[in-house]
Image (cartoon, coloured by chain):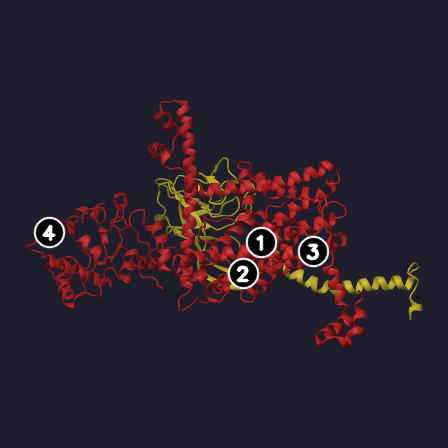
């Protein structure tokens, strides 16, 4: 059909037909469309030919969703996480857009593997299609490159630490490695320019190159025609509409899977009658990247997990092992794949190619399974059967000599026990990963909660807000600086007794509240492990006062003690709002009274001097807590009778104190449970 | 006009010159944007990590003399391209001190294998990297078999007269057997 011939019949056509003729005369588009659609498919349309088309579709999906994401994304260390948070949690439909982009990327990797497998099994890489096969391999690497660079862009803990590993591996390439690493991360430190470069690679250089290669890939595919799977049993058909229909159905199926992954959790929640938070659908967003905060749950995206696990294969090989695992072996595998079209000229060569490709995919699958097993081992192993081994391990401290002695030198038993200990070690490692993953989820949820404050994110970025958050920072600071002596455990918790027994200073759970003070003033508890029991004050004046005077109903009525408790909580600003003013006043009078608490403790200006016992003015308030953590040896607190507690905020001229004023403030806020609540 | 085109099989000298000039002009015109781009793109190669300096990390009394390493944040001012940060945590070190000794040993918390954050096992018996399971003894030595090519990186550490523990903050290349400053 000649395109220009149709113009003769123009007078009998409608407006649309005439307009189409007008453009065809000037562009010849009909011929192009015909060329594109009426490709002969030998043997008719088949499902096995859809993989290439689904890949093009997946890529187009990424371009479309990527461009729209780009319209809301801001690549810098102070805005990347923040803008992705905004897309995911604040923008209408942002969660869906990001979810499609995130999961289609994963679908693309699967489709790549299937397309490659189909091409190799069908022998479609053989002459004259060698160049097209090579182009396909380059396209595959470009897609994986986009996956790798995209992982960093949200600038969350996960992407940040995974990128550190990936770029450090680039650094071990001989000669050019260090320069390459420096170029990719945009300097010597990870920051703004790491993001701008990764973003330019992800959204510019790599897709640009990919589109160029894809055009040639498709042109060559057309030049050589479709490689039909033999034997051909059915008559030939045209690409349009037979094969296009199958392709379109496959594309729809791919999109349905991607949408399913995003929407199934919402469906589940709806069926369970729970509210659906769209921000939690689709792609995850971790806590913002923090170079000073360990991230033990660091793992690459699942399709790179086999490479991650492969590095562990070379344990004990030193630098050679890493070079082999990260550079040489993957390089050799790619090398063999590039040689496939040449090897395929021989019958045996083709069989080798098929076996090699299946072997690589099986190997990657196996490594992925191993990696997952290592991480999640603690979830499915039968821990009950290892109880005896655990007991023996605790008793011997894991010492081989002690184990031998405990088992009477029985070699068979020792070997069996050592096997069980190995299992225990695997459980410990797995549990550490699971705990870290759980912590990462908590941190992420908290960061998202904070970002959603009405005040929004400060200009310095989310990390500043997270670092100033008592709820998430408090437990870390406490664990690092306080927990070697103090416990922080709800006395009602099942493991409270064991934790308290190990502590050597007061339990600070609910410090400043009436519940804490009630325990202190309880004769049965004051010398227990939750208060002064494990300290130098266990024989002190306070203990003898509580166990003597307070225990004597003639001296102290129950109501009076309760009034003191309430008054103290009021000093901390943590009294129950329903407390009667009269009770408060009564309690305050008792504490001030020189014949009662005021005999040792100062409260306001009750005339008691500092130095005999801690000043109770503002006891348990933020200011009071900051003061005692900064310097418990100050006359206002324990003075000379301070028992072991370091002065965390005091340092010699020019030296760094153990804790900065900000950190001490965070500890005080955390102890008082004074933090942002939505 | 068609008659002026030289026979394709017998290109004239003038035609050869035109070809050379066409390629040269086009090439030169394209070199400018590519050259400017590559020039700017290579800028990070000029940037060297700041000269290592001793940073006060903590006080001697904060490092218990029980031989067990403790983690401390390294706090310093830093610049990230156009942004200058006031003092903030930029990394972490492990410090430890033998019984009765005033000498402090410092180890970088960065894993020499691939740069993850090495953690101390809960039992406090060894270091372990959560990424690829490299294990190290409490003095930073390799526990074999390990994916790590070298022991944990010791950092120079000194105790000032006022009791301040100062660590020379340096980063080293990951994945190589030698300790090379990055």
User: SS of the residue at dot 3?
Assistant: helix
The first of marks 4 and 3 along the sequence is: 3
Identity of the residue drawn at 39% across and 52% down: B58
C-alpha distance separating marks 3 and 2: 30 Å
C-alpha distance separating marks 1 and 2: 20 Å
The first of marks 1 and 3 along the sequence is: 1
Disc 1 versus disc 2: nearer the observer: 1
Provide residue B8's location: percent of width, then percent of height.
91, 60
Chain coloured red in this rendering: A
Provide residue A503's location: percent of width, then percent of height.
27, 45
Q: Chain of mark 3?
A: A
User: SS of the residue at dot 4?
Assistant: loop
The residue singled out by tag 1 in the image is A147
Disc 4 versus disc 3: nearer the observer: 3
Quadrant for residue A16, please give it: bottom right
Who is closer to the viewer here, B36 or A220? A220
The residue singled out by tag 3 in the image is A213
Give the number of callouts.
4
User: SS of the residue at dot 1?
Assistant: helix
- Name the mark on residue A192: 2
The residue singled out by tag 4 in the image is A551
Q: Chain of mark 2?
A: A
The first of marks 1 and 4 along the sequence is: 1
Badge 4 crowding class, 10 Å Cα cut-off, few under 14, some 14 to 19, many 20 or more, is some
Provide residue B68's location: percent of width, then percent of height.
38, 42
Badge 2 crowding class, 10 Å Cα cut-off, few under 14, some 14 to 19, many 20 or more, is many
Quadrant for residue A210, please give it: bottom right
C-alpha distance separating marks 1 and 4: 70 Å
């Amino acid at each position: 059909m000649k395109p220009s011939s149709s113009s003769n019949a123009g007078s009998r056509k409608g407006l649309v037909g005439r307009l189409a003729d007008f453009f065809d005369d000037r562009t010849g588009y009909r011929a192009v469309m015909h060329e594109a659609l009426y490709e002969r498919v030998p043997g008719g349309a088949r499902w096995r030919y859809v993989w290439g088309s689904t890949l093009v579709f997946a890529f187009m999906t990424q371009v479309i969703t990527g461009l729209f994401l780009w319209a809301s994304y801001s690549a810098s260390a102070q805005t990347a996480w923040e803008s992705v948070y905004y897309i995911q949690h604040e923008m209408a439909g942002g969660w869906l857009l990001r979810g499609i982009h995130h999961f289609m990327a994963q679908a693309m990797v699967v489709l790549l593997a299937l397309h490659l497998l189909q091409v190799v099994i069908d022998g479609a890489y053989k002459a004259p299609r060698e160049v097209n096969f090579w182009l396909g391999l380059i396209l595959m690497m470009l897609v994986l490159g986009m996956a790798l660079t995209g992982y960093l862009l949200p600038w969350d803990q996960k992407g940040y630490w995974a990128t550190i590993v990936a770029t450090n591996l680039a650094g071990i390439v001989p000669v050019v490695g260090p320069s390459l690493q420096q170029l990719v991360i945009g300097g010597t430190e990870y920051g703004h320019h790491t993001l701008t470069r990764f973003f330019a690679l992800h959204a510019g250089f790599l897709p640009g190159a990919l589109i160029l290669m894809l055009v040639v890939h498709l042109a060559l595919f057309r030049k050589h025609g479709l490689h039909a799977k033999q034997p051909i049993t059915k008559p030939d058909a045209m690409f349009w509409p037979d094969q296009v229909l199958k392709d379109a159905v496959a594309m729809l199926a791919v999109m349905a899977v991607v949408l399913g992954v995003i929407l199934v959790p919402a469906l589940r929640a709806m069926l369970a009658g729970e509210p659906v938070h769209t921000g939690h659908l689709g792609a995850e967003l971790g806590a913002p990247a923090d170079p000073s905060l360990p991230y033990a749950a660091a793992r690459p995206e699942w399709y790179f997990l086999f490479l991650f696990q492969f590095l562990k294969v070379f344990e004990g090989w030193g630098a050679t092992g890493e070079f082999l695992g990260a550079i040489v072996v993957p390089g050799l595998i790619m090398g063999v794949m590039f040689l496939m079209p040449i090897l395929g000229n021989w019958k045996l060569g083709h069989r080798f190619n098929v076996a090699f490709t299946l072997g690589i995919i099986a190997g990657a699958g196996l490594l992925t399974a191993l990696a997952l097993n290592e991480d999640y081992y603690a979830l499915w192993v039968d821990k009950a059967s290892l109880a005896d081994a655990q007991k023996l391990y605790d008793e011997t401290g894991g010492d081989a000599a002690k184990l031998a002695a405990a088992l009477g030198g029985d070699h068979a038993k020792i070997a069996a026990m050592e096997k069980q200990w190995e299992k225990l070690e695997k459980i410990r490692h797995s549990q550490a990963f699971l705990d870290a993953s759980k912590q990462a989820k908590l941190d992420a949820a908290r960061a998202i909660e904070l970002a959603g404050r009405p005040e929004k994110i400060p200009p310095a970025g989310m990390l500043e807000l997270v670092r100033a958050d008592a709820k998430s920072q408090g437990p870390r600071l406490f664990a690092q600086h306080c927990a070697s002596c103090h416990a922080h455990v709800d006395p009602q918790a099942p493991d409270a007794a064991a934790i308290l027994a190990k502590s050597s200073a007061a339990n600070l759970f609910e410090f400043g509240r009436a519940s804490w003070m009630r325990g202190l003033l309880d004769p049965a508890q004051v010398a227990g492990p939750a208060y002064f029991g494990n300290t130098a004050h266990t024989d002190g004046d306070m203990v003898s006062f509580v166990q003597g005077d307070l225990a004597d109903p003639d001296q102290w009525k129950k109501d009076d003690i309760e009034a003191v408790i309430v008054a103290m909580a009021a000093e901390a600003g943590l009294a129950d709002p329903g407390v009667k003013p009269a009770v408060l006043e009564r309690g305050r009078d008792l504490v001030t009274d020189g014949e009662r608490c005021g005999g040792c403790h100062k409260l306001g200006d009750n005339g008691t001097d500092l130095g005999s016992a801690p000043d109770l003015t503002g006891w348990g308030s933020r200011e009071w807590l900051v003061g005692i953590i900064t310097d418990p040896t100050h006359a206002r607190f324990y003075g000379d009778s301070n028992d072991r507690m370091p002065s965390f905020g005091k340092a010699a001229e020019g030296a760094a104190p153990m804790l900065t004023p900000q950190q001490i403030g965070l500890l005080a806020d955390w102890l008082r449970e004074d933090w942002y609540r939505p | 006009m068609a008659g002026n085109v030289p026979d394709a099989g017998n290109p004239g000298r003038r035609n050869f010159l035109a070809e050379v000039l066409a390629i040269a002009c086009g090439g030169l015109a394209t070199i400018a944007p590519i050259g400017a781009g590559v020039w700017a793109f290579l800028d990070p190669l000029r940037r060297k990590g700041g000269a290592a300096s001793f940073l006060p990390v903590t006080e001697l009394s904060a490092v218990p003399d029980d031989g067990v390493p403790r983690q401390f944040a390294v706090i310093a001012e830093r610049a990230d391209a156009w942004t200058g940060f006031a003092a903030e945590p930029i990394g972490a070190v492990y410090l430890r001190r033998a019984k009765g000794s005033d000498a402090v040993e410092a180890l970088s918390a960065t894993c020499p294998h691939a740069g993850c954050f090495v953690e101390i096992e809960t039992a406090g018996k060894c270091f372990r990297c959560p990424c690829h399971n490299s294990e190290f003894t409490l003095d930073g030595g390799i526990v074999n078999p390990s994916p790590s090519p070298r022991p944990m990186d010791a950092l120079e550490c000194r105790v000032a007269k006022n009791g301040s523990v100062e660590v020379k903050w340096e980063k080293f290349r990951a994945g190589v057997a030698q300790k090379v400053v990055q």
